Image (cartoon, helix red, strand yellow):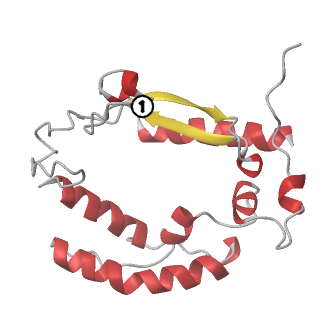
Amino acid sequence: MVNDPPRYDRSVWRKSPTGPSELLKITSNEKPSRMKVSSSIFAESPMDLDAMINEHDQIIGEYHSKYNEISWDEMIIPDFSYFDLKIKIAENLLEKCVLCEKKCEIDRRFEIGSCRVIKPVIASEFLHMGEEKPLVPSHTIFFSGCNFKCTYCQNWDISQHPDRGIVLDPVKLGLIIDLRTQARINEC
């Protein structure tokens, strides 16, 4: 007899002494996600990295208090947000890349660093039926490429080959995630 994969069991969340979890509220659209909340906080559009990091540090407290209190009805999306600021900081960091332990300082916009990653390549994407019952299923995305070269890596077949997989436009990946999320909610 083949065991069917476990279904998304919301009763696990409801048995919690604190009520439904944050994750359930987000997946049920009762609460905005962290990305959505950060997209609703106004930020200045500074020019250099130091100014951007200072702006980020000034906003983080507002973000934490707003995340715990905001509802969908209160959200107003500014022209330039805290989330946009985070993107600008990340883009700026790619100019002299130090995102991994190799700290190659290559301008990743134009050159390949020691990680050998040009564009993010997706090795696999699926609903993971893991062991943690409240988190089953979780949406899992494995990206190809890693420069650690660990001897006992369980994902060596994708970690050491940054070209294995497919390149997906971020909008298309977002649509795939939305479709899987909707299918998971419909199963409940």
Q: Quadrant of the C terminus?
A: top right
Q: Residue at x 11, y 48 (%)?
A: 104
Residue carrying label 1: 168
- Nearer-the-camera pick, 99 or 39: 99
Q: Determine whether, in the image, residue 44 is placed left or right of residue 172.
A: left
Instruction: Please state which amino acid type lies under the numbered disc 1.
Output: Leu
Q: Residue at x 10, y 38 (%)?
A: 111
Residue 131, compared with residue 20, is above or below; it is above
> Secondary structure under badge 1?
loop
- Nearer-the-camera pick, 51 or 130: 130
Q: Quadrant of residue 160?
A: top left
Residue 99, image x and y in percent? 24, 53
- Nearer-the-camera pick, 120 or 147: 147
Q: Residue at x 21, y 51 (%)?
A: 101
Please indicate, yes or no, whether residue 81 appears anywhere in the rendered image.
no
Q: Quadrant of residue 86?
A: bottom left
Please indicate, yes or no, whether residue 87 appears anywhere in the rendered image.
yes
Residue 17, compared with residue 130, is above or below; it is below
Residue 154, image x and y in percent? 45, 29
Q: Determine whether, in the image, residue 128 is placed left or right of residue 50.
A: right
Q: Please count the marks in the image.
A: 1
Residue 168, image x and y in percent? 42, 31
